[in-house]
Amino acid sequence: MRDFFHDFLKNIKSVFWERNLLWHFLAIALTFALVFTGFDWRYFQLTRNPILQSAFWPAVELGAFVPLFGIVIFYIISAVRKNKKLMSTTFALGQGALLGLLVSDFYKFFTGRIGPPDIEGNSIITNTSHGFRFGILRGGLFFGWPSSHTVVAFAMAVTLFILYRNNKFVRFISLFYALYIGIGVSITIHWFSDFAAGAIVGTVIGTVVGKSFREK
């Protein structure tokens, strides 16, 4: 398990260091633009229909299930087969997922964004896309900005993308998974800007973790 924390503190620092910090500012600026131009609200109105909800709701469950149980399953398989490469990949994915959760929760701790409203029948709904409750734990850690589902999914996907840069199948599947999770939650439980910012932050984390384990 020691390899799970390979360069852990160094990687945390790298996620917020130098050029990577600029990506965080980009995520914030993009969110500002999407909210105040009204894009978030228009996207919400266009995507709340039964067909899309049914097609993308599994993303909510997969986004929570895969990072936890998928990594455990990979660990068991690699341990049984005594496959060092798969074991290292498992640790890299685990670290990417953990960093993704920690970073997204760090932001949620202070931003307290209100999630999209529930639509029941033809009830009139109010635009809450501007609803940020800045402070300390004013909105909890389970919902809000950025999307943890998206950050973790992109962190894991980009980690695989870098570790298996010559394997087109792995790269395609990892990218498809991340996009499905991110777009899926933007159509169900998050605003579009939660997904957009999460994709940026998750990509930064995955790049840092992937390069760290690839060098190892």
Image (spheres, rainbow, N blue to C red):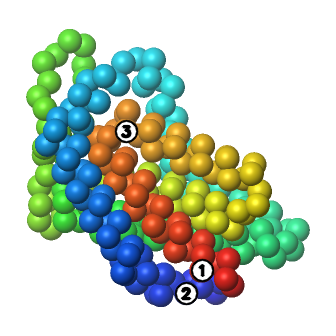
User: Which is more toward the observer, 131 or 77?
Assistant: 131
**Earlier along the polypeptide chain: callout 2 or callout 1?**
2
Q: Which residue is mark 2?
A: 7
* Residue at mark 2 to residue at mark 3: CA–CA distance: 32 Å
Q: Residue furthest top?
A: 122
Residue that label 3 marks = 186
Amino acid marked by disc 3: Ser
Query: In front of the other: label 2 or label 1?
Result: 1
Contact? badges 2 and 3 (CB < 8 Å): no
List x then y, in percent, for residue 66.
59, 52
Q: Residue at x 24, y 19 (%)?
A: 120
Residue 52 vertical placement versus 187 (above, below): above
Helix, strand or loop for disc 2: loop
Q: Which quadrant holds residue 92?
A: bottom right
Q: Which quadrant holds residue 49? A: top left
Which residue in the structure is indicated by mark 1? 212
The answer, for residue 127, to whether it is visible in the render is: yes
From the top left corner, tell me how far across and down residue 33 is, in percent.
20, 47
